[in-house]
Amino acid sequence: MANLLDYLDWRGDLTLAQSPFNEVDNLVLSELSFVDFRDIVPAPGKGESVELRDAAEQFFARFPQGERIEMGVLVPAAIPDMLRRMASSRRFGTMKLNCFVDKLDHDRGEQFAALTVETGDGALYLAFRGTDDTLAGWKEDFELTCMPEVPAQKRALLYTRTVARQFPKLRLRLGGHSKGGNLAVYAGVFCPATVQRRIETVWSNDGPGFRTELLGLPQHQRIAGRIVSIVPKSSVVGMLLEHEEVYTVVDSDQLGFLQHDGFSWQVMGDHFLHLREVTPQARLSDLELRDLVQRMTAEQREKFVTALFDVLTASGAQTLTDLRADRLKAAGAMIRAMNDLDKETRDGLWNFIGILFKSNLRMTLEGIQEGLQEESRKLLRDRRETRE
């Protein structure tokens, strides 16, 4: 089955004039925001746009030939390969990049990065980076459950207003993967009406939702019809909290939580392979996690998030890569930190971990069963064709 890399091979020779911007292009540009373009692409208001193929050449020049480019534990390792194919394609190579921002504050638990792409068809794509390898970024994700607004959302709104002023004549597309999708929706909802009218589409690619209040606001209702929410069939991240009532479900060749990886989403021509609905196990996981969150008061949620990340950073780790690199040291420090918590908080953490483990196990088993059923159907078809 085909993925984003296959799409670039098959359709990269088609310009946007030949084949208009589509949902797969959206995910490609969302993933592009994970590339570190510091000192290559100018910050807002700081310089002329750089062609994607030139930015790619400068990026790869940082690494000795043949050296593996580490993206982190959960950031797709295929992104450098994607960038190479984009740079050599007619569709993406001449697109222009600008307004690169990358802010990280470990102490305050804040992570925000974004990139603006002049797509060449009279529009911009504002790509908001999702959660990266940093524990600060993951903490901010969890704070979505207990804070009316997190720092990254404020930055996304300011970023959108700034870029809109810098490029006053172009249409706007906003998008991102994971937390980046949440940031895109937030910025699209709360930006000034004059900016909002210029927005063509807001893309949330398996992005977590919002607290209930946002969906009923008039600002949200003005743009709700232009928000496209895409989730894989066993989505967990994209089904968290309250989300858009209408969402597109796509097929994935991965199991369980691994379906969050956009490179696992299946592509057919100029679109993803669409399904009718998420799997029953994904819906059950969504209900369990929501129930856990909703049973907590705002104060309890905040205490829970603080405790969780105190445990994760007890070893001095700042990234998931740090945790993986020295597992024994991290595990010992985390166990000691867990023992220092009060019983209620410690039980809550174990309950949360248990739900995540059960969810992934259920969806993995469901995926295996689905694969076996498909193999059985294929075997029966082959037997019938042989008889005929």
Image (cartoon, rainbow, N blue to C red):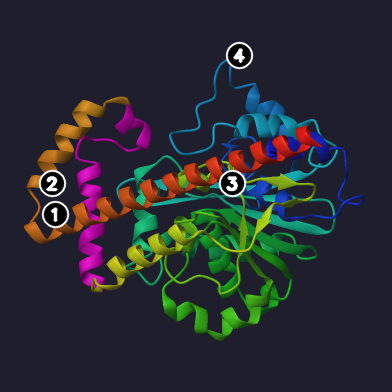
Q: Say few, some or many: other residues with alpha carbon within 10 Å of mark 3 (under 14 / 14 to 19 / 20 or more).
A: many
Question: Mark 3 = which residue?
Answer: 252
Kindly check if marks 1 and 2 are in contact, taking CB atoms under 8 A apart as contact: yes
Most foreground residue, 194 or 86:
86
First reached walking from the N terminus: tag 2 or tag 4: 4
Q: Main secondary structure of the magenta part?
A: helix
Is 252 left, or right, of 124 in this rendering?
left
Q: Quadrant of the N terminus?
A: top right
Q: Secondary structure at mark 4?
A: loop
Asked whether 277 or 189 is in front, the reply is 277
Please provide the residue range marked out in magenta.
298-324
Disc 2 and disc 4: Cα gap in Å?
42 Å
The quarter of the image holding the C terminus is top right
Q: Gap in Å between the C-alphas at discs 4 and 1?
A: 46 Å
Q: Is residue 118 visible?
A: yes
- Give the residue pinned by disc 1: 346
The residue wearing badge 4 is 66
Which is nearer the N-term, disc 1 or disc 3? 3
Above or below, 296 against 92 in this view is below
Q: Amino acid at mark 2?
A: Met
For marks 4 and 1, the one nearer the N-term is 4
Q: What is the secondary structure assignment of the residue under circle 1?
A: helix
Return the disc, 1 or 2, that comes first in the chain's sequence: 2
Q: Tag 1: residue type?
A: Arg
Residue drawn at x 58%, y 74% is 189
Q: Amino acid at mark 3?
A: Ser
Q: Which residue position is annotated with label 2?
A: 338
